[in-house]
Image (cartoon, helix red, strand yellow):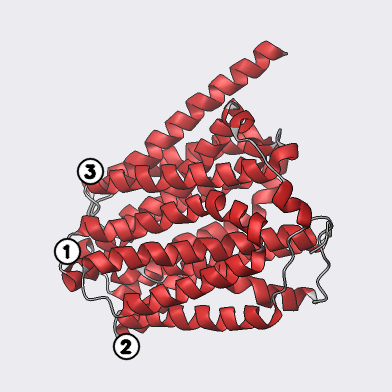
């Protein structure tokens, strides 16, 4: 280790092949599992609420890991955190495939999330170490975002095909095999990148927590990501149980929402440049409210279908992109001197709001209807718009 971030002797494609699998696997473990969610209560002999817990715990741990594993990787290095996380993820995946009942399944999903979180944090810390002041960083983050946008589109389709051909356990076997391959590659080629000065750095969260801008934009991020979380938590039950879709038909219907996300992302820069952070967030929340209204109309006057459940999500997907495109900049704009702490807190708070608020909406408002999605999205959008109005008022008073 050296005081300055080391330069890897890898070409950009080689570095991406080394790092990207860990980020992709963390997301894939959520999406590839969706087609079998409606069947899991019967398979495990438990309730839908417990199966929902396996989604929520995973999301919670991904967020908490930002705060837990960031300091650990600063103390002992990126490589051991990454390798340890990958091994834990792989082991939990294989044991999930053999899980006989609900309790071990829930525990193993939590451990799988711990491993995913550790590997993901170590991956992004390595990117910061190596590429922070280099032009390749823009390319890496852009490609990571593009790849992750495709995971919700392709993951459920892959899960449905595996489950149909080999049974539900094959989904977790596949995740375990992919994690083993990624870990073996990293064992051979991933060397330590942590600067010595990282272990000495100490940052406070207090200035961040006192910032109204941080809370406004973090709530906006939570509204956007929570909308997608509640959508994929309820979509299997609404479309498979309610609308009678097959697992593969559900996967293709679900993928259309991800495609809208991808297409909108392609043009997001143009809109953000025109509207700015505040204008983009406002329009994003407006799209969530509009989609929630369409969902409510479909729930009251229609039956579960592509048109009453998925098409309104297309509208909300556009709002998600508008919001997510600016929330990080808006929340972290004034914290360049404590960027690491601010980023960790931003993602941790978002994850807790999404997982707790989204789970409560799904459990209390019947996860086999559109009401959890419509209620969560509309409520969060209104809260964000109120916070944004208060932020604008305070800024005007200061000027």
Q: Could you say which quadrant of the image residue 137 lies in?
A: bottom right
**How far across and down, in percent of the image, does residue 109 sit?**
36, 65
Image-based side of 320 in relation to 394, left or right? left
Position of 1 with respect to 203 (left or right) is right
Is residue 392 placed above or below 375 in the rendered structure?
above
Task: Kindly identify the residue that appears in the image at 73 percent across and 52 percent down.
Answer: 198
Give SS at disc 3.
Answer: helix
Q: Quadrant of the N terminus?
A: bottom right
Q: Secondary structure at mark 1?
A: loop
Question: Tag 3 or tag 1, which sits nearer the N-term?
Answer: 1
> Residue 208 got which mark?
none
Residue 318: % across, % down: 52, 49
- Residue 346 in view (yes/no): yes
| Residue placed under numbered mark 1 in the picture | 46
* Visible residue check, residue 365: no
Circle 3 residues within 10 Å: few <14, some 14–19, many ≥20: few
Could you give the CA–CA distance between mark 2 and mark 3, rounded to whole angstroms? Answer: 34 Å
Q: Name the residue located 63 percent from the left edge and 29 percent from the top edge.
A: 207
Q: Which residue is mark 2?
A: 166
Horizontal relation, residue 120 to residue 225: left or right: right
Q: Which of these two is toward me, 151 or 64?
A: 64
Q: Quadrant of residue 256?
A: bottom left
Q: SS class of the residue under badge 2?
A: helix
Residue holding disc 3: 364
Please report the residue visible at 32 percent of the width from the left and 48 percent of the height from the top. Answer: 359
Quadrant including the C terminus: top right
CA distance for labels 1 and 3: 17 Å
Judged from this view, the residue extending furthest toward the top is: 397
Q: Which mark is nearer the camera, 1 or 3?
A: 1
């Amino acid at each position: 280790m050296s005081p300055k971030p080391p330069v890897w002797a890898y070409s950009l494609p080689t570095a991406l092949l080394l790092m990207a699998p860990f980020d992709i696997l963390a997301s894939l473990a959520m999406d590839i599992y969706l087609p079998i969610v409606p069947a899991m209560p019967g398979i495990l002999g438990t309730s839908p609420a417990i199966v929902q817990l396996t989604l929520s715990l995973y999301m919670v741990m991904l967020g908490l890991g930002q705060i837990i594993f960031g300091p650990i990787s600063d103390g002992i290095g990126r490589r051991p955190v990454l390798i340890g996380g990958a091994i834990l993820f792989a082991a939990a995946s294989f044991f999930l495939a053999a899980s006989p009942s609900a309790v071990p399944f829930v525990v193993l999903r939590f451990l799988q999330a711990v491993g995913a979180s550790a590997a993901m944090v170590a991956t992004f810390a390595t990117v910061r170490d190596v590429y922070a002041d280099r032009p390749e960083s823009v390319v890496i983050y852009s490609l990571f975002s593009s790849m992750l946008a495709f995971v919700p589109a392709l993951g459920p389709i892959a899960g449905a095909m595996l489950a149909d051909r080999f049974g539900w356990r094959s989904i977790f076997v596949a995740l375990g095999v992919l994690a083993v391959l990624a870990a073996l590659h990293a064992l051979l080629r991933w060397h330590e990148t942590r600067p010595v000065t990282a272990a000495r750095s100490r940052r406070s969260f207090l200035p961040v927590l006192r910032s109204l801008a941080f809370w406004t934009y973090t709530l906006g991020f939570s509204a956007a990501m929570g909308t997608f979380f509640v959508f994929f938590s309820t979509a299997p039950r609404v479309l498979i149980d309610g609308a009678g879709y097959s697992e593969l038909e559900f996967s293709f219907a679900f993928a259309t929402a991800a495609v809208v996300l991808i297409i909108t992302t392609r043009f997001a820069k143009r809109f953000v440049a025109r509207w700015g952070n505040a204008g983009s967030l406002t329009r994003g929340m407006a799209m969530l409210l509009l989609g929630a209204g369409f969902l409510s109309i479909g729930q009251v006057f229609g039956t579960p279908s592509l048109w009453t459940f998925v098409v309104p999500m297309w509208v909300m997907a556009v709002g998600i992109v508008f919001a997510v495109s600016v929330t990080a900049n808006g929340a972290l704009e004034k914290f360049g001197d404590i960027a690491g702490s601010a980023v960790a807190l931003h993602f941790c708070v978002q994850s807790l709001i999404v997982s707790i608020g989204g789970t409560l909406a799904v459990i209390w408002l019947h996860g086999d209807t559109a009401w959890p999605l419509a209620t969560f999205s509309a409520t969060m959008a209104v809260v964000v718009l109120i916070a944004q109005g208060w932020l604008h008022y305070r800024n005007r008073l200061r000027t």
